[in-house]
Structures are given as structure tokens and as C-alpha cells.
Amino acid sequence: MSALPPLISDLALILITAGVVTLLFKRLRQPLVLGYIVAGFLTSRHMPYTPSVSDADTVSVWADIGVVFLMFTLGLEFSFKRVISMGLKPVMAACIVIFAMMSLGSAAGHAFGWSRMDSLFLGGMLAMSSTTIIYKAFDDLGLRAQKFTGEVLSVLILEDILGILLMVVLSAMAVSRTFEGADLAASLLKLAFCLVLWFLVGIYLIPLFLRRVRRWMNSETMVVVAVGLCFLMVVVAVQMGYSAAFGAFMMGSILAETIEAETIGRLVAPLKDLFGAVFFVSVGMLVDPAVLVEYAVPIVVLTLVILVGQAVFGSGAFLLSGQPLPVAMQCGFSLSQIGEFAFIIASLGVSLGVTSSFLYPVVVAVSIITTFTTPYMIRAAQPASVWVGNHLPGTLRQAFGRHNGRNARHRALHAKPSPASELLRALGRQVAAYFTLSVAVIMLAFSVLLPLSRGVFGHWPGNAVCGLLTLCVAAPFLRAIVMRKNHSDAFRHLERKSTLSRAVVYLTVAVRFVIAVLPVYYVLDFLSPLRWWIHVIAAALIVLAMIASRLVKYVSIRLERTFRLNLNWREAAARAARRPHQPYAGRLLSRNVHIARLELPDASVWAGRTLAELDLGRRHGVMVAAVVRGSERLNIPDGQTRLFPADRLEVIGDDDSLRALADRMAAETLRPADGTPAREMHLRRFVVERGTPWAGQLVATSAIRERYRCMVVGLEDNAGTITLADATTRLDVGATVWAVGEAPDLARLMQSARIAPAHAPSAP
């Protein structure tokens, strides 16, 4: 027999240990992430009393796969359009929190005398709050229906995308070992270029591909295709000098705009859970008790930095974003922990070899402590806000009051941009997108097509062929730079408004024309031996020819329509399924009430009852705006609407009323008492003996169903064949009967079929 590979035995040890420990943590109502970390410590070489993993390097490869799946599923829950629709205030809050916590973390690292790279990575780790831990705490405390949790969710989403960018910047700094502003700006510019290019190409190609092959897709092929696309982007990202996690996140965010996003997320979830468990176990394997004892003081200090820093700067960030003091402090106190993203940043530093070995276990210890303190910090937010409100000066109390925050949000919601600013923003987006595509076409042509054409046609003929094909492919993008938005309502309004406005819009056309000429000039100057001024004139004429070409115009419009169709594919499918976006939800946030979605439990006693019978409005002061049932949606239901298990109720109310409703909904369910055995059904076989009360009767007249709560399934003949029974089947003496029922009922039925012969009447 061949020897068992170490990977198999290591995985067996890891998964069995993780399974046992996480079951214990589940029983103790603690986050599973902590259970995985404890399991990793138990299977590491730092724990001499338990078996240890023999090949840590192979486990680290599996852990890297776990990071890929974690970031891929995170991207599936992310939406660029959702971030844009949030406005600037959540962005401002997230940026303030990250910058403040990075500064505090870096300052703490320098104060301990750690290296500059250790301090920089430490700041990045302390800046990222844990989405998993926060949501677990909200669920345990029953706070998911409250208004402030939506604000926390918005900032967490932005922190995730900013954390991805932070990882890219840290990687660039780690590789270059420099903090020069020019190098950092160049890295950010390259990152922006890759982001725009990947997003545009991905949104155009991937939904198009999924629509074409949809009829051949099932669960098996869907998960294979999705995971394949994920790892393809991982390879591309690594080849471009970025991390694998960044590539996985980008592919997830692209697939998030397709209608298959929810299906892919559901199919990939088991893979994420499995490999994610291995990743968190590998984190626990790095916990060294000797290091924790040696760095006990930094661990305590860093814990206080997170708790106090998030409480102060987090609350201040939400205050500056327009939230009232109570909501701002609830949000800030909720962010006071670090978790999975800190581990990912720490593993990045380890893989790059730029952080010290002690930093990883220190951060893990801080994460464990802050995880346990998270529920207490959330509970402390409300009394802390009362205390702060009572001790603030009158002017500050008025400035941070509820009324001021509500008015600020109201103004932000109803503020309408001017036509000029709206046009300039649209032009900026379109120029950036189409210029990026044009540059990408040129780069791809010069790196792939140019060597091939020179090898086939020779140097100068090859240059001509390459240049002609490159300009033909880039023509729709270059034309769109100049002509897009020139017939929009905002453009025409400004054109007719005044001479100055007309000059401004014409200036934008001229500037865009110059921007479109630049790539053409670069292609000509790179491939042609003529003078530069000839290239300038030729480039301008070529762009004018592109603008005049009807074919180029048609291709440009067709490409843009396809892109918009793909970008809005998921929303269009939701509208077709009668699940429209709720525009009133944003308006309600500017008042004291908001909308929350509550799901009716499967075993709810409310099932089958009408809204009038439940009387939710009078008892809880809430209004049911809609009932979502599968793909159907019942808007503005009346009192006669009946509820069914798994219905999702969109309910309008304030925090107190929604919390009371959620508590009542969770409490009023059909649950068996502790220790009650499950009422399982069993199948039994017995012979009808002489003297049985119902011997010789039909199934319909035997009263077996009514008297014994059992059902006759069929009769078995001598050959062992079972004939299904119906109401007219006769139960003769000696017949072999198959019956189904609960165990006690079957026992009574079988007892009645075996009456002693002495009690039976004599045979005729």
C-alpha cells in the first residue's frame, strides 16, 4: 500500500479539529472565526500536547486559496453602482476612519520601536473593521432592524473596497521599499487604469458570454465556470504585479452585476467555507504563546488603540457625515474590532517578506480580544451618547442633535446638481473610460500584434498593418470621446443659455478632440518615420474621419448599448420579476423612521394568519409596505393578506417598534420542548392473526387510521411482491400487511393484530 501524502493527513487533522472546536464555539454562541483560530493553535507546533501539522507549507497554499475564495465572495456582494449611489457622506466617513486608525496604528508601531514597514502594515490592519464579527454581534443582540446598522453596512462596504486599494498600495511600497510621492502616484495611476480597464472589459464580455451559454448552464457547470473566471483574474492580477486577493475581488465585483450573482454566491459558499476555514486555521497556527507573553504590553496598548480610537474617530467621522450624536456613537462603537481583513493584510506582509514574525500573532491576539469586547462596546454606545450629550456645551449639543442631522440628510437627498456640473461629471466619466480602452488597445497591439505583423510582412509594411488595425479597433472609442453627450439635454441647455455657457461647452468639445488626437498621434509617431508635425496633422484628420464615419458611429453606439445592457442586467431582471427598487427607503432615512426587511420563520405561528388578525399597526406602531414571497411581490397589502412561512415583510417604523416586532416574530414559533424526541415515521411489517378486531374488513371500515393513527401501505404476497393498498383492500387473516406511522402508534396497531387464540371466537 502506498504511503498517505502528508497533505491528506494534515487536512484530516485540521478539519476534524476545526469541526470539534467550532461546534463548541457554536454552542457557546461565539464567532466561528475564533474557533478556527483556536483549532489552528491546537494543531500547530506551538501546542506540544496535541498532534501537529507536518507540512505547514502545503497548508499555507490551501490558505492562499481560502483568501481567494473569501475575496471572491466579498466581491460578489459588492456593487460599484451601489457605492456611487451612496453619495459622498459614507465615503467621507470611511476615509476618515481608515486614515485616523492607520495613523494611530503606525504611530503606535513607531512608539514601540518597530520598523517602518511593520508600523505601516500594522496601521493597515488596525484600520479594517470586521464585517463578519459586526454582523454576528448585530444578530446576537437583535439589532439588524435598527437604522444605524444600515449606516454601518455602508461604511463596511466602502472599507472593504478601500482595504483592497490599501493592499495594492502596501504591496507596491513593499516591493519598491520606497515612500516617494512620485512612485506612489504612479502606482495609484496604474491601479486606476487597471481597475477601469478590467471593469469595462469584464462588464462587456462576461455577461455577454453568460447569456450566450445560459441554456447549457446547470449548477455544476456554473460553479466550474465561475471559479475558473475567478482564478483567471487572479493570474492576470499577479502578472500585473497585484495580489491574488485583488484579482479575486475584481472578478467577484464583475459577476455581481449579472443575474447569476446570487446563484454563484450560493454555489461557491461551500468552497468559501471550506478553504476559508483552512485559512483561519493557518492564522491560528502562527499564534506563539511565547511571543504573546513577550509582547503582552503592545497587545494591550493596541487593543486600547482600537477601542478608544474607533469610539472617538469613528463616532466623529459619522458626525461629520451628518449623523446625529446617538446614531454616530452607535456606528463608531460598532466598528471597534479587527478581524478577517486584518489577517489577509498580515498574510500579505508575510508572503512579501516585509513584516516581522511577531506581528502576525500580535494582531491575532488583538483581534480575539476585540471580538469579545464588541457586544459590550455596542451596548455601551447608547449610555455613552447620553453622557456625552449631557456634558456637551449647548451650541455643540444643538449642532450634533437629531434635528440637525436629519435636515442635513434631507438636504443631501434632495440636492439636485446643476446642468453644468452634471454634464462635466458625465464627460469626465466617459473620457476616462474610453481613453482607457483606447490606451489598452494600443498597448495590446504593440505587445502582441506588432511583432507578429513585422515577422510576416517585414518591418515597415508590418508597422503599417499594425497601425491600421490598431486605429480601426480604437476608432469607436476615440469617436465616443469627442461626440458622446453632445446631443444630451444638459449640453443643449447650456448651449442655449448664454454666450459664456456656449463657449464652455464648445471648449469641452475642443479639449476632447485633443484628447482623442493624442493616442492617434502616439501610434503614428511610434510606427512612422515622418516628421512630428505631419503626424499631428494626420492624427487630426484621422479623428475627423472617425467622427464622420457612419460605420464607426454605429459600432460605437452598439458597443455602448451592449455595455449598458450588461451593467443594468441584474436590475432589469429584478424589475421583470416584480421586485422593484424602493425609492421611498432613502427618503425615510431622513426622518425618524426607516424601512427594514424581516423574514417570517418557517415554524412561525403567524403562518396562515392575516395582517388584520395580527394587528401589527396597533400593537407595534409599524406599517407593512410590502410582502415579498419568492419572486412575487405584494405591494401595499391589505388586512386580508395572509402570511406564509419564509415571507419577507418590508416594514416601516422606528428602531424601538421594529426591534419589538422582530423579537415577537422570533419568539412566536412552534418549537418542541427541550428533550422532546423527534416524531419520526416508521414502516413496519406484520401478519394479521385470527381474532384481530378488524380481520376480514376493508381498509376503509377498519378504522386503523382513526383509532391507531397509522396508514396501511400495502399487502405482501408469498413471492414478496407488495401491492399498494387502497380503501377497498381487504385485510384477511394471514395477510402480511405493511403499515406506516409513529413508533408508539405502530406498537399499538401490531399489538391489536396479535390477540391470543383463547380470546378469539371458534372457527365455523
Image (tube, rainbow, N blue to C red):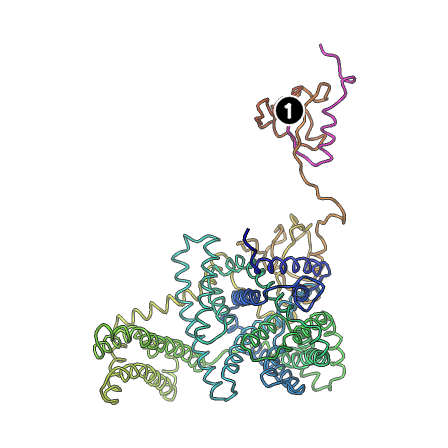
Q: Secondary structure at mark 1?
A: strand
Report the label total: 1
Measuring from the top left, give residue 696's x and y in whole percent.
Answer: 67, 19
Residue at coordinates 63% horizontally, 53% vertically from top-left?
A: 639
Is residue 740 within the magenta segment?
Answer: yes
Measuring from the top left, give residue 475's x and y in whole percent.
Answer: 30, 75
Q: Quadrant of residue 694?
A: top right
Residue 362 vs residue 89, the one in the foreground: 362
Label 1 Cα crowd, 10 Å radius (few <14 / some 14-19 / many 20+)? many
Figure check: 157 above or below 736: below
Measuring from the top left, give residue 400's x and y in whole percent.
Answer: 67, 81
What range is drawn magenta here?
735-764
Q: Quadrant of the C terminus?
A: top right
Residue at coordinates 72% horizontally, 12% vertically from top-left?
A: 763
Residue 58 vs residue 732, the one in the foreground: 58
Figure check: 91 above or below 13: below
* Any part of residue 418 in sight: yes
Measuring from the top left, give residue 225's x and y in whole percent.
Answer: 45, 59
Q: Quadrant of residue 758?
A: top right
**Which amino acid does the dot numbered 1 rest on?**
Thr
* Any part of residue 583 in sight: no
Q: Quadrant of residue 33?
A: bottom right
- On the image, numbered disc 1 is attached to which residue? 736
Is residue 209 within the magenta segment?
Answer: no
Residue 260 vs residue 723, the one in the foreground: 723
Residue 297 vs residue 634, the one in the foreground: 297
Q: Residue furthest front?
A: 1
Q: Residue furthest right?
A: 758
Figure check: 434 above or below 248: below
Residue at coordinates 30% horizontally, 83% vertically from top-left?
A: 522
